[in-house]
Amino acid sequence: MEIRFLKAEDAVEWRRLRAEALEGDPEAFSSSLEEHAKLSLDDVKNRLGLRSDSFVAGAFEDGQLVGMAGFHQESGPKVRHKGRIWGVYVTPSKRGYGIGRDLMQALLERAAKIEGLDQIQLSVTETQVPALVLYRSLGFETYGHEPRALKIGDRFIDEDYLVLPIRHGSR
């Protein structure tokens, strides 16, 4: 298993795995497959360009992307101290092997080096219990809960908001 940060050349693989995630686990993401389908390949390439404040870690097996996790730092002067993890997903056949943990650790190590970043936030739906267990084991703490955060068909799903303080130079 190779864990590395994605580049524009990985756009086709990221797009494929993101569609798999949105279709297979719609309750885990606030984005929809319909929204994803509207993204052009150039949009995806721009998202994956190597930047110091926005990046996606990927897990590759035999050249195929089997897991991913994204990070971006807020841009406004009053919120640049915060970063956000998004789009964490591991294909079902590869779950339970520590890939999610490896992806998260890669993101956290890189994010901890960003000057001025003091905390990392993420959200997780109530249906994603293994993800919540992982995030808490990495030191994230719940700071909020939103009832009925997502609506899929006639079903509402609650979401928890978690935060991890960053100590620069550690992780």
Image (cartoon, rainbow, N blue to C red):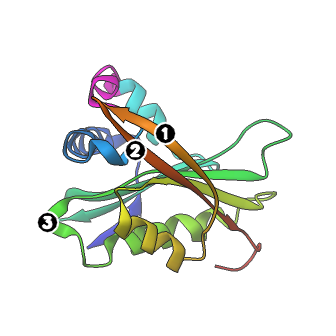
Q: Amino acid at mark 1?
A: Ala
| Residue 59 image point, x, y percent | 31, 64
Q: Is residue 22 magenta?
A: no
**Lateral position of residue 105 relative to residue 171, left or right:** left
| Mark seen at residue 149 | 1
Helix, strand or loop at label 2? It is strand
Q: Give the camera-side residue of 20 and 55.
A: 20
The tag earlier along the polypeptide, 2 or 3, is: 3
Q: Give the camera-side residue of 95 and 77.
A: 95
Residue that appears at 78% across and 46% down: 80
Helix, strand or loop at label 3? It is helix
**Lateral position of residue 18 relative to residue 20, left or right:** right
User: Which residue matches tag 2?
Assistant: 157
Q: Amino acid at mark 3?
A: Ser
Residue that appears at 76% across and 58% down: 117
Magenta residues? 32-41
| Residue 38 image point, x, y percent | 32, 19
The answer for how far apart the CA atoms under marks 2 and 3 are is 25 Å
Helix, strand or loop at label 1? It is strand
| Mark seen at residue 87 | none
User: Which residue matches tag 3?
Assistant: 93
Q: Give the camera-side residue of 13 and 118.
A: 118
